[in-house]
Amino acid sequence: MLTNWRIISVTIIISVITMSCTQKKKADLIIANAKIYSVDNDFAIHQSMAIENGQIVGIGSDNEIQAQFNAQETTDLQGKPVYPGFIDPHSHFLGYGLGLSQAWLAGASSWNEVVERLIDHHSQFQTDWVIGRGWNQNEWDVKEFPTKELLDKAFPNNPVLLTRIDGHAAIANTKALQMASFSPDTTIAGGQLVAKNGELTGVLIDNAINLVRDIIPPQTKQEKQEALLLAQQNCFAVGLTSVNDAGLNKEDVLIIDEMQKQGKLQMKVNVMLNPTEDNYEHFLNNGVYVTPSLTVRTVKLFADGALGSRGALLLEPYSDDQSTKGLQLETTEKLTEVCQKAFDAGYQVATHCIGDAAVRLMLDMYEPFLTPQNDLRWRIEHAQTVHPNDLNRFGQLAVVPSVQTTHATSDMFWAANRLGERIKTAYIFNDLLKQNGWLPNGSDFPIEHINPLYGFYAGVVRKNLSGNPPEGFQMENALSREKALRAMTIWAAKAAFEEDVKGSLEVGKAADFVVLATDIMTAQEPELPNIQVERTYVNGKIVYLDHKQ
Ligand SMILES: [Zn+2]
């Protein structure tokens, strides 16, 4: 395989123009001898496509394309499968990138190792604040809370904050404690500063952590630019060519727009705006904003929290805690006000809803705005638990359930504790798909892994990466492979009104595509999550090439 790939890309300089060539159309690139899943309406498979100026200008058999086009370059893919570039319809692209500059500290076997890993990480990223998370003293040889001396030695001049795996404890160094004006006498409501022999050890509990977080300066523009480039690099390597970023502020959108216009950021981004005055003023008041790489036409809302922490809003109490039904995160007035604003501006609304009460709340709220046969594509993000009485309302109101199949396989072993019998109404992706005949499937990374093939696998097989449960989880809601592929390509594009320009490989659309080592439509189930991306193209240009090939 090594030798083949080297000779595949052949640049043909046309030195002799024959009569027949003059009939042919010009192309920058022909992809030949491939198995191209167009993901068009008929799910047609082709051998070859021609690309000119970043767009697909022809698709068909090798003979057809050869007969019609003269290309500067022809790439013979030797039968490899090609798909439309993958689209993640719900991710936190910038947040993921920013998180990459924080050290991940789980799995260390001692406090010493944690500090060594941190020094290593900092030599790479060189941030002023040294931030890490994931340490767990229960994994160490000495299973005790650490103290700050090693941190002070390693980082005398940089403030350090390392959060424990559960987020409820952290350790700070002396520099950070000084900046927070903490002393052994400081008392904090809802929090604690751990002290030994009258000295702070650096360990902080609950609200004490927040007081340190509050003094960490927001990331600079340059840090955000670097984060976006890192995120892009990793996303291209898993075949993503477009992402929706679920919740950004004006200044971040402007950075993305600027980097795309400078050609530095090739990742295509669909932005969901946070409901802030700044965003209303700059974006909503001026209507929808669309460039070839950026779409801004959505407002993101939160109706409730997460199921794990019992923050998801349920109609009936939690099965494992009768005292609570979860939390509504915004007042009904505020949510209604934002829906009205978005409607007036011609924007979509996309609301995070995990619990069945949150789903009902938002369907009720959306309803007055959504006439029958509307094409506003207002979205419910996650739509994780849906009361049976509400299911058909997705179809009636044409509300888009924007789901994450990996959430099912991450939650399936504990979600039934929270939900009891209601688990049967949760992660019902196939039932939701039937409502409008389509749905987008994303990852919500960095909550889940960025790899869209994990979502494909979870949607089709409904098992975790270790292959459990062996019979699959609530298999009546598994997706067919074709539907799972549509959900991460054309339907993901549709959820953002982008199906005319991307999401399938058809004439007139962007030449965003991915070449895999093995065909996901025919591979054995256990193979699916491990299939390698060999090449990723955006607008007909290679943005990722697997060098092992
Ligand atoms: Zn999210």
Image: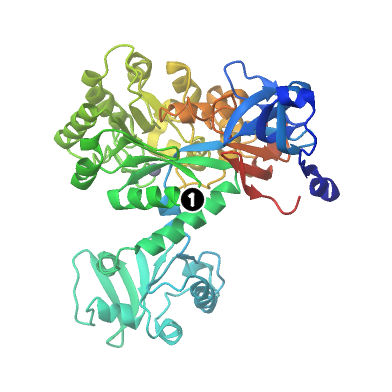
Q: Quadrant of residue 373?
A: top left
Nearest the camera: 320 or 264? 264
Q: Residues within 10 Å of mark 1 (few under 14, many from 20)?
A: few
Q: Ligand 1 appears in which quadrant? A: top left
Q: Mark 1 sits on what residue? A: 263
Whether residue 151 is visible, yes or no, is yes
Residue under the image location 61 percent in, 43 percent down: 541
Residue at the spot 75% in from the left edge and 35% down from the top edge: 80
Camera-side residue: 53 or 241?
53
140 shown above or below 13: below
Q: Is residue 186 rendered to the left or right of residue 319?
A: left
What kind of residue is marked 1? Gly
Answer whether residue 66 is visible to the viewer in this image. no
Element assignment for label 1: loop
Residue 11 horizontal/vertical position (percent): 76, 43
Q: Residue at x 26, y 81 (%)?
A: 178
